[in-house]
Image: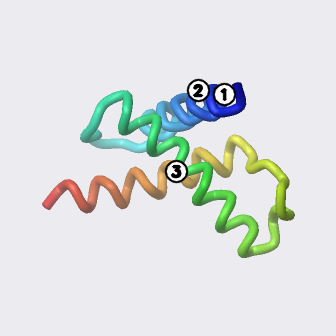
């Protein structure tokens, strides 16, 4: 059940990141979900590296969205060429 929640939250985070980032987006629903999940992982990794989060502490929604926006910008730069 936890995996299903991760997918749903990843989809929501990915949709919010796409809505906040201007420009045309490559990819569909699956890419959006993967970017949201990966954004949450990136936010958790960076947050723990900078001592914002402790080990085992969940990452916040805003940090997940910021991580997904960062990945979306990188994804656009890679697929643009």
At horizontal 74% and vertical 74% (from top left) the residue drawn is 50
x and y percentages locating residue 7 in the rendered image? 57, 31
Numbered badge on residue 36:
none
Q: CA distance from mark 2 to mark 1?
A: 5 Å
Q: Is residue 23 left or right of residue 59?
A: left
Residue density around tag 1, few if under 14, some if 14–19, many if 20 or more, within 10 Å: few
On screen, 70 above or below 65?
below
Residue at which label 2 appears: 8
Contact flag, marks 2 and 1 (Cβ < 8 Å): yes
Q: Position of residue 34 (x, y in %)?
A: 45, 42
Structural crowding at the residue carrying mark 2, measured as other residues with C-alpha within 10 Å and reported as few (<14), some (14–19) or many (≥20): some
Q: Secondary structure at mark 2?
A: helix
Task: Indicate which disc, 2 or 3, sits on the residue closer to the N terminus.
Answer: 2
Q: What residue lies at 25% left-to-right and 40% top-to-bottom? A: 26
In the rendered view of the protein, which quadrant contains the N terminus? top right
Q: Residue furthest left?
A: 81
Element type at marker 3?
A: helix
Q: Which residue is located at x 63 percent, y 34 percent? A: 6
Identify residue for label 1.
5
First-in-chain label (3 vs 1): 1
Left or right: where does residue 8 sit relative to residue 54? Answer: left
Name which quarter of the figure residue 10 lies in: top right
Name the residue carrying label 3.
38
Q: Quadrant of residue 30?
A: top left
Residue in the foreground of this view, choosing between 76 and 34? 34
């Amino acid at each position: 059940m936890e995996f299903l929640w991760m997918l749903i939250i990843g989809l929501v985070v990915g949709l919010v990141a796409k809505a906040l980032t201007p420009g045309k987006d490559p990819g569909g629903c699956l890419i959006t979900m993967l970017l949201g999940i990966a954004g949450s992982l990136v936010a958790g990794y960076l947050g723990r590296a900078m001592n914002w989060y402790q080990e085992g502490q969940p990452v916040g929604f805003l940090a997940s969205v910021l991580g997904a926006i960062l990945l979306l910008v990188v994804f656009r730069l890679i697929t643009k060429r």
